[in-house]
Image: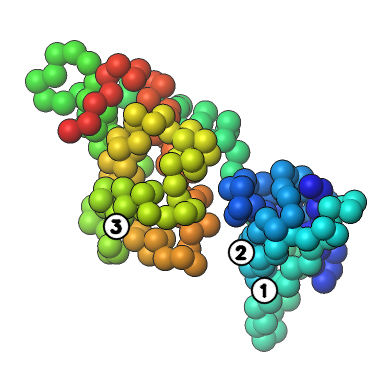
């Protein structure tokens, strides 16, 4: 289907459009347009930090040409403050993200190779040990102990076994995690100290974004060090 998103002032760009029924995600372009696979009775979720979230169950008329959707802007009214321009919303670009991560990891490994090998190791790579080293790389200048409860390995396993939204299909087809590496990915997510607040139903889109970002780093590590060296403690 083809759609266009508006607000009270015109077209709305960079709006996340998620087909909850078919588990597909896209964003509107500069003109507010988007295109995605959909059918009658699918539920579309529209979300942005600048707009109230909106859920629409698709009807026949939505497929007659370009479907139009209107969002209500979130207005922060402050005394004697004039908003001159709308802040740009960041767009997650997988290719750019992967390149930046690879460069950062490779540069740190080059400068500090001793951090990426377990004590006494003679061959191969222990991926769990490697994950710990990479996590420390991204947590420089941050507290070692988080101030919130984090999602555990067990909670991740339970989530993808019981949730209709976070399921095996999303894991393997959307996050691209190999089926035989799913439990290793749970280990990885536990090491990233993801807040358990994201397990709440109202935060599921934020959790999805977090898992997408973490899956990219995880897949980089698999590609960088080879699946034959990957093992779980």
Q: Is residue 67 visible?
A: yes
Residue reaching furthest to the top: 123
Q: Is residue 127 left or right of residue 211?
A: left
| Nearer to me, 112 or 32 | 32
**Residue count near mark 2 (Cα–Cα under 10 Å), binned few <14, some 14–19, many ≥20:** few
Q: Is residue 224 above or below residue 218?
A: above
Secondary structure at numbered mark 1? loop
Q: Considering only order in the chain, which callout, 1 or 2, is on the residue closer to the N terminus? A: 2
Q: Is residue 111 above or below residue 86?
A: above
Contact? badges 1 and 3 (CB < 8 Å): no
Q: Quadrant of residue 50?
A: bottom right
Contact? badges 2 and 1 (CB < 8 Å): yes
Residue behind mark 1 = 74
Residue behind mark 3 = 150
Q: Considering only order in the chain, which callout, 3 or 1, is on the residue closer to the N terminus? A: 1
**Residue count near mark 1 (Cα–Cα under 10 Å), binned few <14, some 14–19, many ≥20:** few
Q: How far apart are the two marked residues, 2 and 1, measured between alpha carbons?
A: 8 Å
Q: Is residue 206 visible?
A: no
Task: Name the residue located 47 percent from the left edge and 54 percent from the top edge.
Answer: 164
Secondary structure at numbered mark 3? loop
Q: Position of residue 114 (x, y in %)?
A: 21, 24
Kindly identify which numbered label has been placed on residue 49: 2
| Nearer to me, 178 or 29 | 178
Q: Position of residue 166 (x, y in %)?
A: 45, 50
Task: Name the residue located 61 percent from the left edge and 64 percent from the top edge.
Answer: 49
Q: Is residue 152 left or right of residue 21?
A: left
| Nearer to me, 100 or 192 | 192
Kindly identify which numbered label has been placed on residue 66: none
Q: Is residue 120 above or below residue 3?
A: above
Q: Position of residue 46 (x, y in %)?
A: 67, 60
**Residue count near mark 3 (Cα–Cα under 10 Å), binned few <14, some 14–19, many ≥20:** some
């Amino acid at each position: 289907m083809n759609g266009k998103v508006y607000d009270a002032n015109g077209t709305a760009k960079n709006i996340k459009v998620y087909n909850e029924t078919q588990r597909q995600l896209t964003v509107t372009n500069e003109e507010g347009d988007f295109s995605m696979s959909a059918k009658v009775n699918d539920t579309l979720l529209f979300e942005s930090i600048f707009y109230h979230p909106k859920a629409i169950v698709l009807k026949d008329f939505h497929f007659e040409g370009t479907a139009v959707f209107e969002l209500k802007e979130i207005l922060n009214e402050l005394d004697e403050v004039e908003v001159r321009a709308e802040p740009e919303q960041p767009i997650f670009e997988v290719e750019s993200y992967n390149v930046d991560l690879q460069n950062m990891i490779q540069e740190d490994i080059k400068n500090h190779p001793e951090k990426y090998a377990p004590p006494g190791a003679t061959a191969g790579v222990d991926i769990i040990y490697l994950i710990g080293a990479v996590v420390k790389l991204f947590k420089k200048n941050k507290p070692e102990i988080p101030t919130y409860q984090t999602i555990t390995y067990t909670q991740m396993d339970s989530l993808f076994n019981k949730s209709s939204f976070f399921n095996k299909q999303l894991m393997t087809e959307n996050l691209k995690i190999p089926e035989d590496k799913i439990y290793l990915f749970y280990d990885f997510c536990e090491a990233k100290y993801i807040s358990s607040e994201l397990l709440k139903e109202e935060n599921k889109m934020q959790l999805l974004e977090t898992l997408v970002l973490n899956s990219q780093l995880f897949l980089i590590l698999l590609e960088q060090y080879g699946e034959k060296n990957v093992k779980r403690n």
